[in-house]
Every structure is written in structure tokens, then in C-alpha cells.
Amino acid sequence: EMLLERGIVVSYETVRRWALKFGPEYARRLRRKRPSRCDIWHLDEVVITIAGETHWLWRAVDQDGYVLDEIVQARRNTKAAKRLLKRLLKKQGCPPRRMITDKLGSYAAARRQVMPAVEHRQHKGLNNRAENSHLPLRRREQAMQGFRSPGGLQKFVSIFSAVRNLFVPPHSRRSALATHLHRLN
């Protein structure tokens, strides 16, 4: 439809061929970053109101700013934190070297049960990477005028984060121009 508005006629067969040609490359780039033993996980939760009910979006981000996993839950307790940690371990395959959270006690209790050998730091200032990862979602939530259901939010954040990870530049001392060029690729 966008091409047609510009006077370019494209058949459905052309779009299908483009999908076959370029689809595998996009799928490869959308796959999650490979876990490593030196990873540091930053965990945080944010409140989201859906149809007048409070829900919590729990998020894990690594030291480079890549979103590792997100889960929407109705509670903010040890059971919910434990569920996030188990899910993260299953997805990543190995525990992190260090875990950084805010001062919520549920993280410490869940870590003791799931990953007792992992170093845990609780400090508000150290967790800015996770706090800042909520900002693009908040902007999108405002543009969408909120979410309609917890299931819809879960589906949205899983795709939104995977696509957004494509545009997070690798963590290094790059210039602003190099970061801009990375985002264009």
C-alpha cells in the first residue's frame, strides 16, 4: 500500500520473493545475543496499568543494553522474581557473573533459591541500565494509548524488544558518528 501510494505497482509474488530473499537475514539478526560467562544482568520491574488493574513488567538487561527477557505478572513478590530468574536461566543457558537490582527484597530471596552462587548487588544507582530500558516502551505505550490486556502486552514487548535490540549499538567507546552508522545498518 505504501509503494502504491508512491505510484509503484508491486505484486504479491514480488513481496513473497522479497520475504524469501531478505527474511532469513532479518531472522538471524533478530535472534538473541549469545550468552557469555562474563555477563552482568540488570533486573528491574515497572508498573503498568491495564484496564484499571496493576500489572508488573519484569525486565532483564545485560551489560551492553540488550534486553534478555521480559515477563508480565500480576504480582511483585518473591514468586514473581523467581519465575523471571528461572525463565532467564532457561533462555540464557548459564548464570551471570553478577546480578544488579534495585533494593526490592524479592530479588535477593529469589536469587538465594535459584542461583545462590551468583554475586548480587543491590543499589539504585547501579541499576540505571535497566531503568533506562523502560523508556522506549513508555513512549510506545503513550503513543498506543495504553495496552488492552496482559497477554497483548506480553506479545508486544517480546517483539518490540527483539527489534529494538537490533538498534542497540555494541557497548564500546564509539563516537557518535560510529553509533549513528551502526543504527543505519
Image (tube, rainbow, N blue to C red):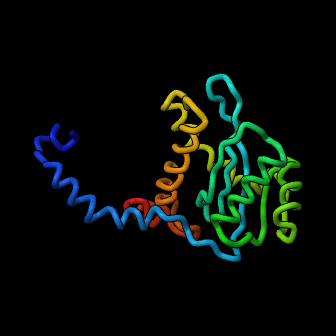
Q: Position of residue 36 (x, y in %)?
A: 65, 75
- Does 49 sit above or below residue 94? above
Q: Nearer the viewer, residue 171 or 22?
A: 22
Query: Furthest residue to the top?
Result: 52
Is residue 6 found left or right of 32 in the rendered image?
A: left
Residue under the point 66% across and 71% down: 93
Residue under the point 73% across and 59% down: 86
Is residue 175 found left or right of 38 in the rendered image?
A: left
Residue under the point 54% across and 64% down: 32
**Within the image, what quadrant is residue 91 found in?**
bottom right
From the image, which quarter does the C terminus lie in? bottom left
- Does 176 sit above or below residue 104? below
Is residue 36 found left or right of 105 in the rendered image?
A: left
Q: Position of residue 176 (x, y in %)?
A: 49, 61
Q: Position of residue 50 (x, y in %)?
A: 62, 28
From the image, which quarter does the N terminus lie in? top left
- Does 90 sit above or below residue 51? below
Q: How many marks?
A: 0
**Within the image, what quadrant is residue 129 found in?**
bottom right
Is residue 31 found left or right of 130 in the rendered image?
A: left
Query: Furthest residue to the bottom?
Result: 37
Residue under the point 46% across and 61% down: 30
